[in-house]
Image: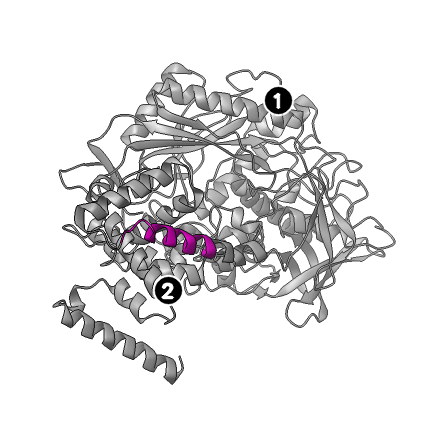
Amino acid sequence: MFDAIVVGSGMSGGWAAKELTEKGLKVLVIERGRHVEHGADYTDSLSPWELQNFGMVPEEEAAEHYGIQSQCYAFSTATKHFWVKDSEHPYTQAEGKPFMWIRGYHLGGRSIMWARQSYRMSEIDFESNAKDGHGSDWPIRYADMAPWYDHVEKFAGISGSKENLPQLPDGQFLPPMAMTDAELDFKAKLEAKYPGRKLIIGRCAHLTEAQPQHEELGRISCQYRSLCERGCSYGSYFSSLSATLPAARNTGNLTIVTDSIVHSVVYDPKTGKATGVRVIDANTKQGRTYEAKVVFLCASAIPTAQILLNSTSEAFPNGLANRSDAVGRYLMDHLSGMGAGGIYRGFEARYHHGRRPNGFYIPRYRNVTEPAEGFTRGYGFQGGVLRDNWRRGVSRPSVGAELKNELRRPGPWRIGLSGFGEMLPRPENRVTLHRTRKDKWGVPIVHIDCGLGDNEKKMIEQVAKDQREMLEMAGCTDIYVNKHYGGVGLGIHEMGTAHMGKDPAKSVLNKYNQAHDVPNLFVTDGACMASGGCQNPSLTYMAMSARGAHYAASFLKEGKI
Amino acid sequence: MSSAESATTLDRRSLLQAAILLVGGSVAGLPASALAQAAAPAERFFSPGQFAILGEFADTMIPRTDTPGAKDAGVPEALDALMTNWASGERQEQFRALVDQIGATGLLAARGDARLALVKKFDAERLGAHDPVYGRFKDLLLTVYYLSEAGATKELRYELIPGKWEPAVTVGTDTRAWAV
């Protein structure tokens, strides 16, 4: 018998485990995938010529086993072991509505391969549902989250600059990374032309100056290798394996089991509480049960919904904590893949040294400082201005010494912009259990029915217009604007499938991330999100997990649950 | 590694060393990647005739100058290995056909400037026609060269551990581009 079970060891599960163990609770973390050893299982010591096939996964293997995962930019022979084989982990999608579900099943989850951008949500975001009527009103506001953002930022190590922007609150930052001269030039031009827009350095979970709390765990400052998605042996960016799980282990209160797939949560109708979880051993397929006083679901949005929907009983015929019928609904991602770019003229006498694992960020301005035509909410841009390398020669006719001499010099500065837009919470975008198909462990697979609405389509159009206008304003040449939107899911920010709300009849969780229907069941991963903002959400999951763990531990101590 | 395999590897390595001595070179002067490629598994994907065409085309595209050329960097061997270890069946067929088409231009018979002119013409025509097979071929050729140890460190510059980020260093007369 444990005090708490945490399902999942990624961004959210790691934080729940750290906070609960530090409060003296005996915690079991259950991970469905294999063990990963921090450092030893990473490939960050390999130079480009040492990578298998120069990083290219064999074409037939990629098509047969990684049809979806291979669409992620971070998929290569150096990281292949961190992505699921789609062939082993099937799901179905609604006709004509592709959903690209990018994931990794191993200790640490996607906290190893994440893009590390770390932004707070703002009061504007927490008020959005109440103001425009979409989804459920958040039962919390920014003031509820601010101290928890402070708390997780100090421990995780977030680099950034203070900007005093209402739509993107400042935090407890390590020193910001520097911009290139071309980026500073673009910033000056942009802010002069559009008084409502700001260009700031990206806020990222990298130790630009490791502090004692980081060094205690063996983490050192970033070495600017930008090999992050292979895992960082230096622990220079935040992951469960570099930070939260080691901290949890240091308390002596942590137990981890890997290769253990949670089938469902066990519910006791006499007490009205969860008593533990049913698990299937990934290797032997044997079933077993673990018991605890509190259960945290941190399996990521879609699997958390899957577990709840698969936890049926007489009391909950449609899935545990699902009297609202909201479990699985309101699935969101961020609109992504909306790229644009061009040549940025000038600055030939300057170059960069090192590989900055970060770029710039243009925070949301639509419906904040500038109006929007025909849509609510907004979008931000990630980007960068760096000099081209030899790749510019690939499609250009040139051969021989001429080709070599041209490509040995740094190329022109090139700007890239990538839009990230908010998707509205809509009940029809949902995850359900497949009626008949089960995976090889006998768990019903999920069916994903998620598409774009009119608001998202209008936003995509405006993103493209804004990109072109900003690039032209800055005097860029060879401008391209890629309106292509690859499909929902490629933002890799699944959210909303067990959302927080004030009304138990319409939402799944209360303001403590506690299930309305089951008082000792907490959900602190992306499933809890009532709306998504347009910021990268991981920092919010961290803060939400620390906050939820605080309340769960308090309630337990007070005998409330 | 079985003893049979290690014997083969050893034999290949010593053969290569003998070949280098024959042409008056030294193993020490050879990029490690070339040795690794040569010591790697045996069977070639391309026929000896096709491999010769590939080698001359690559070395004309990226010749030895004051820095290693494609052959010095082991590009033909690396491309051949990619055909076995990476390419789909469809791509294998496309690349075999492409190498045959390059051969049909009379590449091997041409020498010096004539060969360079021939490669230049082929490159311009195929890129001009947006031939996707040639486009990918040139992409791979450049990738395998510039990401080889010789290409990345002798022709260009690469640091596994830069240690710092400097956003605005001054470009000098011989500043080389970063390979990555």
Q: Please tell me whether mark 1 sits on a helix, a strand or a loop.
A: loop
- Residue A175 can be seen, yes or no: no
What colouring does the structure picture have? one colour
Residue shown at the point (51%, 51%) measured from the top left = A111
Residue shown at the point (74%, 35%) measured from the top left = A428
Residue B102 among magenta residues: yes
Looking at this rendering, what residue extends furthest in the bottom direction? B3
Looking at this rendering, what residue extends furthest in the right direction? A314
Residue A308 among magenta residues: no
Q: Which residues are magenta?
A: B92-107
* Label number found at residue B47: 2
Q: Quadrant of the N terminus of chain A?
A: bottom right
Q: Position of residue A372 (x, y in %)?
A: 57, 17
Q: Callout 1: few (<14), some (14-19), or many (20+) C-alpha neighbours within 10 Å?
A: some
Q: Chain of mark 1?
A: A
Q: Amino acid type of disc 2?
A: Ser
* Inter-mark Cα distance, 2 to 1: 62 Å
Q: Position of residue B37 (x, y in %)?
A: 31, 66
Q: Please tell me whether mark 2 sits on a helix, a strand or a loop.
A: loop
Q: Which residue is mark 1?
A: A376
Residue A320 versus residue A413: which sits nearer the camera? A413
Q: Position of residue A66 (x, y in %)?
A: 56, 54
* Label number found at residue A386: none
Majority secondary structure of magenta residues? helix
Q: Are marks 2 and 1 in contact (CB under 8 Å)?
A: no
In the rendered structure, the answer to whether residue A36 lies left or right of residue A412 reads right
- Residue A376 can be seen, yes or no: yes
Q: Chain of mark 2?
A: B
Q: Amino acid type of disc 1?
A: Thr
